Structures are given as C-alpha cells and as structure tokens.
Image (tube, grey):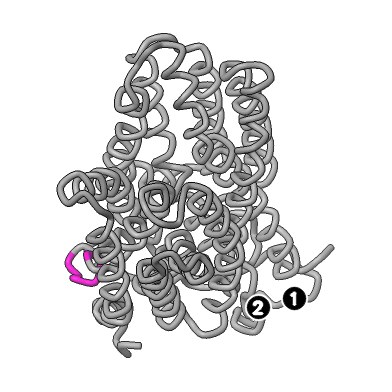
Amino acid sequence: MGTARTKGAVWAWLVVIGCIGFYSIPTGIIGNTSGIFVAPVMDQFGWTQTDTTMYRTIQPLVAAVCAPIAGKLMEKHNPRWILAAVSAAFGLASLASAYATELWQWNLYGVVFGVTSAFFMYLAAPVLINAWFKKGAGLAISITAAVLSVLAAVASPVGQELINQFGWQTARAVLSAVTTVLSVALTVAFVRKSPSVMGLMPFGADEKARPAAARVDGADAATPEAEEGATVAQAIKSPGLYLLILVACIFVMCAAFFQQIPAFCSHGALGASAGAMAVSIIMVGGVVFKLLLGALNDKIGVKFTGIIAASCGAVGILLAYIAGSNIALFYAGMVIFGGGYAGLTVIAPMLARAAFGSLNYSQIYSWVSTGIFIATAVSFLVYGMIYDTTGSFDWCFILVIALYVLAVVLVPVTLALSRATWRSDGK
C-alpha cells in the first residue's frame, strides 16, 4: 500500500484526465467547431447569420447568470456526479440540435449550453486542480487547455469532412455522440472532489508538514493541510476581486479578437489566405504558450507570468498592426500574440488562486467566470460596432493593445490589494 502522499499524487493526475473529459473534450470538439455548421444550416433553412448564431450570444449570458450558482453547488456537493450529469446534458442537447429545424430549438440549445457551460467551461477544472495540486497547478491547468486546443484543431477538419461527405446533421450527431460518451466516461472514472475526502494528500504536499502522529510509514490515512485564503465576505469587500474580474475580462476580450483576424486580412493587403493561416498559427502558438505559461507560473509565480502573457499579447498585436503587407512580420506577430491568447485559460485561474487563496476558491472564482462570460458576449458586439462605425479594424487593434498594457499594470496591483484583505504578512 502506498502512502497518502504517493496515492494523492497519482490521483491528482487522474483528476486532470477527468478535467479533460468534462472540459477539454466538449469545449474543443463541440464549442470550438460551431463555426463550421453556420453556413450549411443557413443554406438549408434560409436563415440569416445573425439568427443562426444567436444561440452563441444566448449561451454566455445564461452562463454568466448561472456561474455563481454553479460555484456554490460545486462546493457543497460531489462534483463527480454534478459534472457527469452536466456532460450528459450538454452532449445530448448537442445531439438533439443536429435535428433542430426551428430557430427556437437552436435558441433553447443555447440556454442549455449556457447552464451547463457555467459548470464545465471555466469553473470546474480550476476548482478541482486547485484542490488536488499544492504545487504544479499551473502546469496541470495548462495541460487541460492545451488538449482543448489540439482537439479543436483536429475536430474542425474532421467535422468539415463529415459535413462534405454526409451532411451537417450527420456530422453534428457523430461529434456530439463521441463527445457525450467520452466526457461522461472520463468524468465518472476520474473526477474526485478533493484529496481530503479520500484520505489523501494533494500533489506537491509536504509530508513533513503534517503532524508527527499522522506520519506513519505505509499509512493510507492523511491529515490534510489547512487551506488558506480569504472568506467570501472578505473577497467581496476587496477591490482586488473586481480588478481580478477586470483582468480576466481583458484576457477574454483580447483573445476573442483572433476571430476578427481573417476579416482584417481579407479586407487588407495580406489577403484571405493569410488570415486563415494566422488562425492556425494562433492555435498552435496557443498550445505551446499554454504549456509554457503553466510551467512559468509554477517556477516564478503568476505576477511575472501574467505580465509576460499580457506583454506578449500587446507586442504581438502591435507587430501585426504595423506589418502592412509584410507577411513575415504579420505571422511573427501572430506567434507572439499566442502568448496573450493562452493567458485566458492559464493566468485568470492562477491569479485568482494567488490573490485569494484556496479556502473558498470555487465561490470566488465563480464570480470571475461570470465576468468572463459577459466579456465573451460583449466582445463580438464591440469589435463589430467599431468596424461598422469606422470602416476599418484600426481602433480594434488599438483597443486590444491598450487593454493588454492595462493588464500588465493591473496584475501586480490585483495581487497586492487582494492579499492585503486576508494575509497579515501582505505577501
């Protein structure tokens, strides 16, 4: 029989596999491939693009409302069964949407998507990894995010080929069925609430930190280390919480700008092919940077890692903006922008943990998730309005650069103000 520390380390990485199940698989295979279904659905039913994609506007708004509720449920009940039910509900709703013939049915799917994504899209994986990893949490979160990107990169061409060969309904049904089976199976098999409920210790926990009576060779029982962090009341009163939400919103607003890149290239000197290549570069760069930022977080802390990520975003977009017809400089900018793009799924959860500790992480981060969902819904509207008003993407680029520079300033300020509310040493 292994020690509580050894078994806890093994289970911690199994929980990461569970997170890939309920988070990376549905978001990567279904969420990130929604674009390939827009044109065939429009063609079949004669709907406008606005009507066809309205469910994607409904989804983050519903999720924003449900995120605080999701945080409380995750804390009070067993996330294994909650997330299994959520995975099943989302997968089956996606499967049903393959046979939707009316707009109200797609919009209803947007509501179900919103309710379920409040649990699985931004909240659950950071909460579970925060519980299971005393050290190495940054790398663990970055792995789930990187797997998501890889799955999205594979699922998109596979889904498009299925559409070409069998039609969009069959393609959506196949992707939904695969997603449902895999996500539910991995969630049930590997998601566990915390090491303490299993009598284990989290990954990276110090065996010597436990009381001597608990340190028995070969013992399976564990005395969990006391969790530190702000109370919910302390967090709500702290200006650091609202800066934390703002930083997370900045990262999602700026990351969402990548979807404007193809249109920018198509209307400019670079051309549509450069825009398509740029999206691929951002996706590949995002995978690399997610792993790099996760490792950096564990080595040098989130303050400097967050500054690096936001700086990469600003520099990358600046290079792309000034590139003109210089395609090499434009591509270089897209590679560097991948660091800012990756910051959303790595920096935001790690900044929350560093700012307010692990004691009430799920409830505190649920408020951050609410901000992320609202910013997601707003971002498309903001960029669209800027282009429609000015006739160019110039002010979109300027806005993204300015937001990233603001994030560089806000990350250390957020940490200082947040920690001051609950840490007497101020560190």
Q: In which quarter of the image is residue 316?
A: bottom left
Is 341 situated left or right of 157 in this image?
left
Residue density around tag 2, few if under 14, some if 14–19, many if 20 or more, within 10 Å: few
Q: Are marks 1 and 2 in contact (CB under 8 Å)?
A: yes
Q: Is residue 302 above or below residue 130?
A: below
The amino acid beneath tag 2 is Ala
| Quadrant in the picture for the N terminus | bottom right
The label shown at residue 216 is: 1
| Label 1 to label 2: alpha-carbon separation | 7 Å
User: Which residue occupies 43% across, 48% down?
Assistant: 262
Residue 198 in the image, given as x and y percentages of width and height: 64, 55
The secondary structure that most of the magenta stretch takes on is: helix
Residue density around tag 1, few if under 14, some if 14–19, many if 20 or more, within 10 Å: few
Q: Name the residue under label 2.
A: 213
Q: Is residue 426 above or below residue 395?
A: below
In magenta stretch: residue 11: no
Is 106 situated left or right of 392 in this image?
right
Q: In which quarter of the image is residue 181?
A: top right
Residue reaching furthest to the right:
1
Residues shaded magenta: 237-242
User: Which residue occupies 71% across, 66% down?
Assistant: 4
The label shown at residue 40 is: none
Residue 266 in the image, given as x and y percentages of width and height: 41, 47
223 or 184: nearer the viewer = 184
